[in-house]
């Protein structure tokens, strides 16, 4: 029985490592002191995943503050994917639960500027 349990644990270990590595590929967004916003400037042409810890019922606003065009692939939180409302240069989401939220953003050039705000 011990041998069977050890084999099952060893078989599951690579799966656990893979899920942790996937989370490590995100870029953490931080806000300056007394600010509601953080930003990223760089290459997101192939898509980039960002991470931000948010409380429940917050309004997350993701804005294009550069000259190119950005597209949101998804925003997901601890309860799953969120539906957003798109306006001119921004998309807004209401968080459902507290915890890390992941946002995948694409740009159409090699230099993009994106702002993440939480109210």
Image (tube, grey):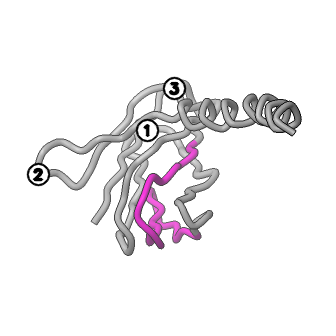
Return the mark for residue 16: none
Please name whichever residue, 77 or 59, is drawn nearer the observer in this view of the structure.
77
Return the mark for residue 34: 2
Please name whichever residue, 54 or 42, is drawn nearer the observer in this view of the structure.
54
Question: Quadrant where the C terminus lies?
Answer: bottom left
Left-right relation of 13 to 106: right
Left-right relation of 5 to 99: right
Left-right relation of 35 to 52: left
Contact between marks 3 and 1 (CB within 8 A): the answer is no
Contact between marks 1 and 2 (CB within 8 A): the answer is no
Return the mark for residue 43: 3
Which of the 4 image quarters holds residue 70? top right
Q: Position of residue 49 (x, y in %)?
A: 55, 39
Q: Residue at x 53, y 44 (%)?
A: 69
Q: Position of residue 18 (x, y in %)?
A: 69, 32
Counting residues from the start of the chain, the first of labels 1 and 2 encountered is: 2
Chief secondary structure of the magenta span?
A: strand
- Viewer-nearest of discs 3 and 1: 3
Q: Secondary structure at mark 1?
A: loop
Q: CA distance from mark 1 to mark 2?
A: 27 Å
Which residues are drawn in magenta?
83-105
Q: Residue at x 38, y 35 (%)?
A: 40
Question: Quadrant where the N terminus lies?
Answer: top right
Asked if 109 appears above or below 55 in the picture, the reply is above
Q: Position of residue 29 (x, y in %)?
A: 36, 41
Residue at which label 1 appears? 67
Q: Residue furthest front?
A: 1
């Amino acid at each position: 029985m011990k041998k069977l349990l050890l084999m099952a644990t060893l078989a599951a270990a690579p799966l656990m490592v893979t899920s942790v590595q996937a989370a490590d590929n995100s870029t953490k967004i931080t806000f300056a002191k007394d600010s509601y916003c953080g930003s990223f400037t760089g290459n997101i042409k192939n898509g980039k995943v960002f991470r931000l810890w948010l409380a429940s019922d917050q309004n997350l606003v993701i804005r294009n503050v550069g000259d190119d065009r950005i597209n949101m692939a998804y925003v997901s939180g601890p309860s799953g994917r969120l539906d957003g409302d798109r306006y001119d240069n921004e998309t807004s989401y209401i968080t459902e639960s507290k915890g890390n939220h992941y946002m995948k953003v694409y740009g159409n050039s090699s230099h993009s500027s994106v702002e993440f705000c939480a109210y």
